[in-house]
Image (spheres, helix red, strand yellow):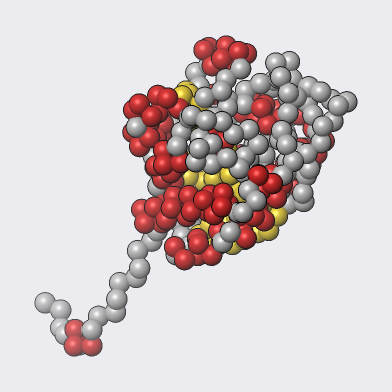
């Protein structure tokens, strides 16, 4: 039986996905705790949101896994997704905006799978410096973080593809990569023949982040269809944010990312946002965590201003209450 979900635009559900199992280095499993410690929940409450912090999934840790060099640490990754999926499903059913704090880039697979219980077709904005379109045959590292989007599209690591029983989780035409810089040759070959859109960081800077974001939303029909946003913080140039596993110079500035995310967040059909690849081990003084909390608060404040229900009208004054209508 179909379930009608009433969107609660004043509510946010937070889930922690403390995993580095698919990542290139340990440390990102500490991200949910670090972002909470930097005051994320309190900041969102101060904006006016009703925040339901649903806690964390079980930690899943980085491992070299030299026995499976083409798909490292797969059992832990699938365990993490299996843990996150029903929690994400319940959060989405509640009608709140789901905010997942991670973690590695594969977590969005569980979020999409949870949402597909209720929504037949979803859009996906993949905000990332990397395409993450490798497969076990093409991967230079064997890390599943570099294959996450491929799994969503129904190709790549079989374990990721099979996580949703009727792949793909999201169709190629309903997916858009935003902020692309690093592309491996097999990924480039795939992009050349795929109907999936992709925007390079240099082109976004040339056109402007706001216009580029608006064009991306138009392409995904975000005014009429539910979608999710995946944010890998390495999309931000290391000059502005270096507390990630594979930082790099160039690409999008923190200001560009703030502008684009603000556009993405102001649409009522946004179901969920996940944050991946922040690594507290590379943030000794906590300044990067505070910067990321500021970013999320700014973006979600703009969403609240654009979409939150207006306050109830004030009761009529005493002298008006007794007047006779014309």
Furthest-right residue in view?
A: 67
* Residue 246 horizontal/vertical position (percent): 63, 33
The residue under the point 50% across, 65% down is 45
Residue 26 picture quarter:
top right
- Residue at screen point 58% across, 59% down: 38
Q: Position of residue 277 (x, y in %)?
A: 63, 40
Q: Is residue 266 above or below residue 132?
A: below
The answer to whether residue 214 is visible is no
Which residue is drawn at the image coordinates 78% and 22% (left, top)? 70
Q: Quadrant of residue 117?
A: top right
Relative vertical location of residue 91 with respect to residue 152 in this rendering, above or below: below
For this rendering, which residue is in front, 127 or 13?
Answer: 127
Q: Is residue 19 above or below residue 15?
A: above
Residue 41, given in percent of the width and then of the height, sits at 56, 61
Q: Residue at x 78, y 26 (%)?
A: 71
Q: How many numbered tags mark residues here?
A: 0
**Quadrant for the C terminus in the image:** bottom left
Estimate the x, y position of residue 124 in percent, counting from the top left: 52, 34
Residue 188 position (above or below residue 67): above
Residue 42 makes an appearance in the image: yes
* Residue closest to the eye, 298 or 306: 298
- Tell me: 185 left or right of 165: left
Point out the residue furthest to the left here.
Answer: 326
Name the residue nearer the viewer: 65 or 271.
65
* Left or right: where 137 falls relative to 123: right
């Amino acid at each position: 039986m179909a379930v009608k979900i009433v969107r609660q635009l004043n509510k946010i559900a937070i889930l922690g996905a403390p995993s580095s199992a698919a990542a290139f280095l340990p440390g990102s499993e500490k991200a949910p705790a670090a972002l909470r410690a930097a005051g994320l929940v309190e900041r969102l409450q101060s904006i006016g949101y009703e925040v339901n912090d649903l806690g964390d999934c079980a930690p899943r840790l980085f491992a070299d896994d030299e026995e499976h060099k083409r798909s490292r640490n797969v059992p832990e990754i699938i365990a993490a997704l299996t843990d996150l999926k029903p929690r994400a499903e319940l959060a989405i059913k509640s009608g709140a905006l789901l905010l997942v704090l991670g973690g590695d880039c594969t977590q969005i697979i569980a979020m999409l799978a949870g949402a597909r219980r209720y929504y037949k077709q979803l859009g996906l904005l993949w905000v990332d410096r990397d395409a993450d379109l490798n497969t076990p045959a093409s991967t230079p590292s064997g890390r599943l973080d570099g294959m996450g989007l491929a799994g969503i599209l129904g190709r790549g690591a079989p374990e990721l593809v099979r996580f949703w029983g009727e792949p793909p989780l999201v169709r190629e035409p309903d997916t858009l990569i935003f902020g692309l810089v690093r592309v491996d040759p097999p990924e480039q070959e795939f992009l050349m023949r795929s109907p999936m859109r992709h925007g390079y960081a240099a082109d976004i800077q040339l056109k402007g982040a706001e216009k580029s974001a608006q064009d991306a939303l138009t392409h995904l029909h975000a005014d009429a269809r539910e979608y999710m946003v995946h944010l890998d913080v390495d999309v931000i140039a290391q000059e502005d944010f270096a507390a990630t596993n594979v930082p790099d110079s160039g690409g999008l500035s923190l200001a560009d990312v703030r502008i684009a995310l603000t556009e993405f967040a102001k649409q009522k059909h946004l179901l969920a946002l996940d944050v991946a690849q922040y690594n507290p081990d590379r943030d000794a003084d906590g300044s990067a965590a505070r910067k990321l909390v500021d970013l999320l608060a700014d973006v979600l404040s703009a969403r609240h201003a654009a979409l939150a229900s207006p306050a109830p009208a004030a009761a009529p004054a005493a002298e008006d209450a007794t007047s006779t209508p014309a």
